[in-house]
Image (cartoon, helix red, strand yellow):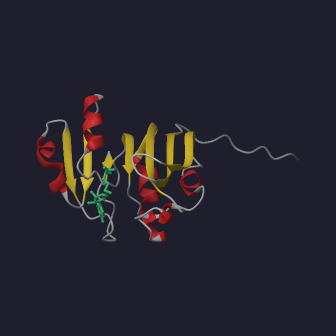
């Protein structure tokens, strides 16, 4: 799943890697003819309208989210990753306001936030909170994680 896919740069990458892609955005105009590709299921939905997550109940081998943040979706995103599946999430973080948009704290991850959201039930493969210089100065968090397949081992309690 490519959530908030925009022009579909990651949908293209995923198609080329052999995935069937579900590309979701509130405006599919930018996706253009990619929406008609046989390997793509394009879903137009407003993720911030407050209704049920449009893909609720479905799970995906890989969920990709970039340059989009709507915190109420975190639970749906956790649920959307299939057991053993992956999550790649990158978006702007606090500190980015020094460089440009977004500046609104609603759209800026707090320090360590992405890692904390996916800490339980996911194996964190990589996490960065970095200041980028290229292609333009920006502060982002990046997370690659794999969803665990079973319950985490119960904590031992010493009698
Ligand atoms: C900055 S673009 C990122 C596009 C793509 N992920 C990328 O990195 O190239 C943000 C995307 O979020 C989508 N978006 C914004 N608000 C949305 C909403 N309420 N529901 C669904 N998509 C939304 C926009 O239409 C836009 O395509």
Q: Position of residue 8 (x, y in %)?
A: 24, 46
Q: Quadrant of the N terminus?
A: top left
Q: Quadrant of ligand 1?
A: bottom left
Q: Position of residue 146 (x, y in %)?
A: 50, 38
Q: Is residue 50 above or below residue 122?
A: below
Q: Is residue 94 left or right of residue 40?
A: right
Q: Position of residue 40 (x, y in %)?
A: 20, 41
**Residue at screen point 35% across, 51% down:** 57
Using the image as rendered, state which of residue 16 and residue 101 is in the foreground.
101
Using the image as rendered, state which of residue 110 and residue 134 is in the foreground.
134
Quarter location, residue 27: bottom left
Looking at the rendered structure, the number of numbered marks drawn on it comes to: 0
**Residue at screen point 29% across, 32% down:** 19
**Residue at screen point 42% across, 53% down:** 77
**Residue at screen point 26% across, 30% down:** 16
Using the image as rendered, state which of residue 56 and residue 7 is in the foreground.
7
Q: Is residue 9 left or right of residue 148?
A: left
Residue positioned most to the right: 159
Using the image as rendered, state which of residue 129 and residue 48 is in the foreground.
129
Q: Is residue 78 left or right of residue 56?
A: right
């Amino acid at each position: 799943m490519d959530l908030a896919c925009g022009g579909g740069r990651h949908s293209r990458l995923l198609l080329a890697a052999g995935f069937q892609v579900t590309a979701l955005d509130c405006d599919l105009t930018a996706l253009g003819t990619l929406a008609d590709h046989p390997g793509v299921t394009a879903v137009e939905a407003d993720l911030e309208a407050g209704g049920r997550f449009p893909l609720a109940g479905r799970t995906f081998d890989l969920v990709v989210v970039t340059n989009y943040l709507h915190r109420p979706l975190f639970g749906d995103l956790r649920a959307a990753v299939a057991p053993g599946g992956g999550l790649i999430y990158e978006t702007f973080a606090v500190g980015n306001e020094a460089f440009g948009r977004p500046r609104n704290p609603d759209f800026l991850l707090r320090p360590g936030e992405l890692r904390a959201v996916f800490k339980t039930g996911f194996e964190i493969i990589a996490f960065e909170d970095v200041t980028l210089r290229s292609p333009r100065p920006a502060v982002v968090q990046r997370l690659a994680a794999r969803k665990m397949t079973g319950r985490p081992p119960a904590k031992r309690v010493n009698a």
